[in-house]
Amino acid sequence: MKEINKVIICGLGGLGSIFASAIKDSNSGILKILLNEERYKKYKMTPTIFNSKEYNFEYILPDENNFKADLIIIATKNDGLNWAIENINNFVSKDTIIISILNGIRSEKEIINTYKDSKVITSFYIGHSCIRQERNIYQDGIYEIVIGSTNKNEEYALNKLSLFLEKSNIKYRISNSIEEEYWKKFMINVGVNQLCALTGLRLKEIRNNDILKRQLKDLIKEVEIIAEAEGITNHRKIYNEALHFLLEELEDANPSMLQDIKAKRGTEIEIFAGEIIKLGQKHNIPTPLNREIYNKIKQLEQKNN
């Protein structure tokens, strides 16, 4: 089996830095970070500090044409996905494996629409949020990357990817029910990210408030109804597991949307409530709670700007 040796990462925020630092530390391949010109100049001047260690990565611009990647990791914010899809073009071959660690349920579909002949492996991050201040990033090591495929034709690529993650000391798990877990992660995000961002509270504070706890349940209940309409057969099981995780298993959470609101950055509301609203319209299903939270978060973003 030909190993993964050439890697491109799009996005050097919290999640991108988890991958980049691990690959750099393990010397498990040639790593390049794909940037636009503005970030290229900025990052050349200001190295990334991840968990108190300074990293000077090798950067690459989109017009480079002599590098074909074995693996491309898209770890941008959601508003950077279209840029990433457009600008990885020079580095993709039919054998390139592409994974997206973006939140939400759309990114893989968008990538496949453009790169039908490449190997797009479903994947997502679950774990503690990264704490980020400019180029100084901290993550406590509690995380895993979940990967999987419903397509038997992708098993070879899935095995190659798992071997590379193992070699790079990146915590991962292969899921045999990736579609279920994918939607469960989405439910969890729709609940905890949005409600924490709106209220300014951490998860443990929401759990101690009966009204907010009820709202958390109702928010992800709307996702369950949409999941059923989208053909997800085990939607009730997924809902119960997501709710149990939020109310019983997860010790606490300071999710990324809450951090974004506090830092006066844009949020990922479009891929959470925004996506639920769109799917609700598609299936003629009302989504009043997600619509309400969408409008309120948008108001907060405008106020912060």
Image: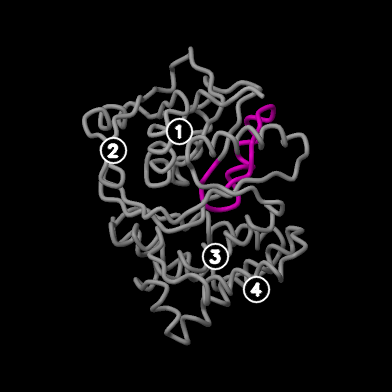
Q: Are marks 1 and 3 in contact (CB under 8 Å)?
A: no
| 39 left or right, relative to 279 | left
Q: Are marks 2 and 1 in contact (CB under 8 Å)?
A: no
- Secondary structure beneath label 3: helix
Above or below for 212 versus 233: below
Q: Is residue 104 left or right of residue 14?
A: right
Find disc 1 in the rendering and name its residue. 9
Query: Which residue is tagged 2?
Result: 48
Give the CA distance from mark 2 to mark 4. 39 Å
Instruction: Say which residue appears at 30% left-offset and 51% top-offset.
Output: 132
Among the 4 quarters of the image, the one containing residue 241 = bottom right
Write the start and end of the magenta stretch as one range: 100-123
Of labels 1 and 3, earlier in sequence is 1
The image's mark for residue 240 is 4
The span from disc 1 to disc 4 (Cα, nearest Å) is 35 Å
Say which residue appears at 71% left-offset and 51% top-offset.
176
Q: Which circle marks residue 155 in the picture? A: none
